[in-house]
Image (cartoon, rainbow, N blue to C red):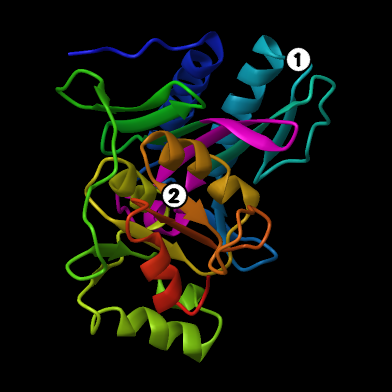
Amino acid sequence: MTQPVLSDRLSFAIETARGAGRVAMEWFQSEALVADGKADGSPVTQADRAAERCVRDAIAAAYPEDGILGEEYDAVETSSGRTWVIDPIDGTKSFVHGVPLFGTLLACMENGSPTIGVIVMPALDECVAAEVGRGCWWWRAGHPAERSRVSEHPSLDGAMLVSTSLEYYDTDARKRAWIRTNSLGAHTRGWSDCYAFVLLATGRADAVVEPGMMNLWDVACVPVIVGEAGGAWSDIEGRRTLESGSMVASNGRIHAEVLSAMGGG
């Protein structure tokens, strides 16, 4: 089986994200975990802060000229044109409730475009990682690294669609559109947050719809991972932007159908 040839930066990103995941696991399902509310109402824990600090310290030591944008601390300006984007625990609500569908996200952007993306699922011992032009790779417990590819499902009929929660749908029309995909033959599930993109990149789901409430650190790794796995991405209106707060990613074959069903594109 072909094994990945990793650049120094991608190797660094994978090991750093894994390290942050190990930090998060020190608090997972622990009575010592304390969740506080942020200004936007989302939870944050000492595990979020410690995991992000772990990543920031590693970047500062290895790439001191690079910028850093993270969820929990102030941004660091870049002098190299590269910026690392960190979500130390994507899926904090799952994490707080002892559900293993949370992950550490790390992306590297060059002049505003993602070039490296990593998602580590520490409680599942699973990781997908990609770099532009080098493919997407999948690591899981008990298996060697393997090339990660999206599914070949050809239509919305029979497709597996994933979305985190109806509470992210800001209008009743969007909620009805999501529910209506079942009448078009799709199967819908709530395998949430970053795990949805892992499922897509490894061919276990066919599309992900996140209609809003997405920050850059939630999605910066997605274009590289999904693109290198053979899929497609856009916002819910069909635009190739990470700034709108929404994300639709798919195996590419059903992207237009998903956008149409959701009223976009």
Q: What residue is rendered at 39% in x and 51% in y?
A: 95
Query: Residue 166's image quarter?
Result: bottom left
Q: How many marks?
A: 2
Query: Is 105 colored magenta in this rendering?
Result: yes
Could you tell me which secondary element the residue under label 2 belongs to?
Answer: strand
Q: Is residue 8 above or below residue 86?
A: above
The numbered dot on residue 64 is 1
Q: Is residue 158 above or below residue 48?
A: below
Q: Amino acid at mark 1?
A: Pro
Percent across and percent down for residue 199 are 29, 47
The quadrant of the picture occupied by the N terminus is top left
Residue toward you, 138 or 264: 264
Q: Amino acid at mark 2?
A: Ala
Counting residues from the start of the chain, the first of labels 1 and 2 encountered is 1
Q: Nearer the viewer, mark 1 or mark 2?
A: 2
Callout 2 environment at 10 Å: few (<14), some (14 to 19), or many (20+)? many
Tell me the magenta residue range.
89-116
Q: What residue is rendered at 39% in x and 77% in y?
A: 261
Q: Is residue 184 above or below residue 118?
A: below
Distance in Å between CA atoms under marks 1 and 2: 33 Å
Residue toward you, 30 or 99: 99
Query: Is 170 colored magenta in this rendering?
Result: no
The numbered dot on residue 53 is none
Q: Which residue is mark 2?
A: 232
Query: Residue 5's image quarter?
Result: top left
Percent across and percent down for residue 139 are 27, 26
Could you tell me which secondary element the residue under label 1 belongs to?
Answer: loop
Is residue 3 rendered to the left or right of residue 13?
left
